[in-house]
Amino acid sequence: MPELPEVETVRDGLARHVLGRTVTDVEVRRDSSVRRHDGGPRDFAGRLTGRTLTAAVRRGKFLWLLLDGEDSGEALLAHLGMSGQLLVRSGGEQADVAGSHAHLRTRLRLDGPDGPRVLDFVDQRTFGHLMVADLVPTPDGAPAGRGSALAALPAPAVHIARDLLDPHLDRAALVGALRRRRTEVKRALLDQTLVSGIGNIYADEALWRAQVHGRRAADALRPVQVGRLLDAAAEVMTEALRAGGTSFDALYVDVNGSSGYFDRSLAVYGQAGRACPRCGATVLRDSFMNRSSFTCPRCQPRPRASARPRLPGGPSPRT
DNA sequence: CACACGTCCTGGTAGC
DNA sequence: TGCTACCAGGACGTGT
């Protein structure tokens, strides 16, 4: 599952392999891959063709490539969803044949100083998408004083909060905001408008590291516990980033959610029935909202009712 | 056929 | 009472 570390790895790969290149052709093979683009597939292709990619930027799980040009307030915005990949390869015919992929959704051809290249958007489960989006200035934009387009966000991403690896994140404010939420702490961690980049996998890993059960009420946690939780999340994502970032060769930009870290180092996610690496108790799997949560019953005791959020409806008057 | 889950959307609620 | 911000849960989509 592409969460922050995987998306950052893709961003870095794009920064190294497609910047400065110009789009020569756009082939949308499945319209739904650009379903969020206002003008449809044809407009999508039209807006990209001839544009040069000038920067690769990420916030949370959103990723975008800035486009040059007169009206340069635009970006090619990508979200990988559950299974999206962006693959770069050299643009020779051989690569075309070898590179034909069962789940290829959109292909961009690029031209640059050292020959043609191909940027493929591949997505098995189709939750991902591409679009050309307008950049809009935002007060929460980005480092002041960098008067470039970096200070603006693509319109569909303006509601996305800064992520834990963003040097301009206001940690104290985030701790406060999390503790103000009247919901389960895991749900708050997954809320991209509070803090971005955390998905189901890293949420479970962070909660395990901080020894907090995800069903505890966010507003019942002490500030220091929330701080530890955020530290744990930043830590586990940094480790995953290091592990994933080293496993790609020079040209291919690849993410399938594994990033090498997935299988090896997860303490609880997907580990139901196995031993907790810290205490040896058997890891549990619970269902919530059609999603899975993995916890260690000893390290992360389930909260008593009084420590769970008071949900709408209150203590049911079930007469 | 249940299950994987990130984001968007809807309907409803709490609190002012 | 009316308004707003917030929150829970369902829909979506495809392959294993």
Image (spheres, coloured by chain):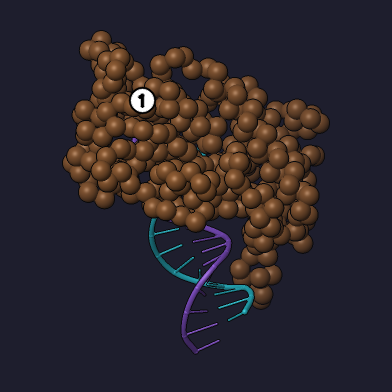
Chain colours: A brown, B cyan, C purple
Relative placement, left or right, of A274 versus A42 is right
Q: A191 and A90: which one is in front?
A: A90
Report the amino acid beneath label 1.
Answer: Val
Residue name at image x 21 percent, y 28 percent: A24
The image quadrant that residue A280 belongs to is top right
x%, y% of residue A130?
33, 39
The image quadrant that residue A83 belongs to is top left
Relative placement, left or right, of B4 versus A136 is right
Using the image, determine if residue C2 lies above or below residue A292.
below
- Can residue A96 be seen here? The reply is yes
> In what element is the residue under mark 1?
loop
Q: C11 and A153: which one is in front?
A: A153
x%, y% of residue A151?
46, 47
Quarter of the image that includes the C terminus of chain A: bottom right
Relative placement, left or right, of A81 versus A185 is left
Q: Which residue is mark 1?
A: A18
Relative placement, left or right, of A198 versus A173 is left
